[in-house]
Amino acid sequence: MARAHARENDPRAASRALAASEGLLEQAKDAGGDEPAWIDFYHHARLSADAAEVFRDLKNPKAALAWNQRAAAMPPGVFTRSVGMRLAIVGTAHLQARDLGLGLELGNRSVDILARVRSSRALDYVREFSTALAPWRREPAVRDFIHRTRTELAIGGPR
């Protein structure tokens, strides 16, 4: 729900939904081994990754990067698509914070992973990253990245 509110640019509702998610996770943790089946796939690392995306969408790179720090590292071989998408999200947050170098580094790592995955959703994350590159579209490294996404992922870049 927080991600939907962020897409609608409603930071208060997104923050409330994130807080509610945190509360549910704490309740499940406090229940010990009696967690409800519906929460078994959701954990603090996933919440942190979702929160990073929420704050990226709200154009709050400082919060996005802080939540990313809280996220536990996901094993690349297990959640390949998730890792690739998360790299694109965090790379976009770095671009929003005006850090082209680190943003491009993460964007390229995202393409390294997502070039091996077939997922239209994953490609959307790379498209969003590419759109965030618009202020630097004349930079050679950005042109190289856009060329790479066109050839390896068949997607374009900023205009």
Image: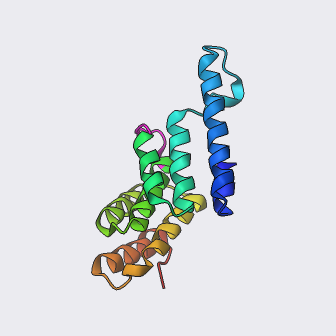
* Residue 49: image location, x then y, percent: 51, 45
* Residue at the spot 47% in from the left edge and 80% down from the top edge: 158
Extreme front residue here? 12
Left or right: residue 3 versus residue 138 is: right
* Residue 138 shows in this picture: yes
Left or right: residue 141 versus residue 28 is: left
Residue 101, above or below 51: below
* Residue at the spot 41% in from the left edge and 54% down from the top edge: 113
Magenta stretch encompasses residue 12: no
Residue 39, above or below 139: above
Residue 83, above or below 34: below
* Residue at the spot 44% in from the left edge and 61% down from the top edge: 93
Magenta stretch encompasses residue 76: yes
- Specify how the rendered protein is coloured: rainbow
* Residue 134: image location, x then y, percent: 44, 79
Magenta segment's dominant SS is loop
* Residue 114 shows in this picture: no
Extreme top residue here? 33
Left or right: residue 33 versus residue 125 is: right
Magenta stretch, residue numbers: 71-80
Total numbered labels:
0
Considering depth in this image, is 140 or 52 the residue closer to the camera? 52
* Residue 92: image location, x then y, percent: 44, 63
**Image quadrant in which you'd find residue 72:** top left
* Residue 123: image location, x then y, percent: 53, 64
* Residue at the spot 66% in from the left edge and 45% down from the top edge: 16
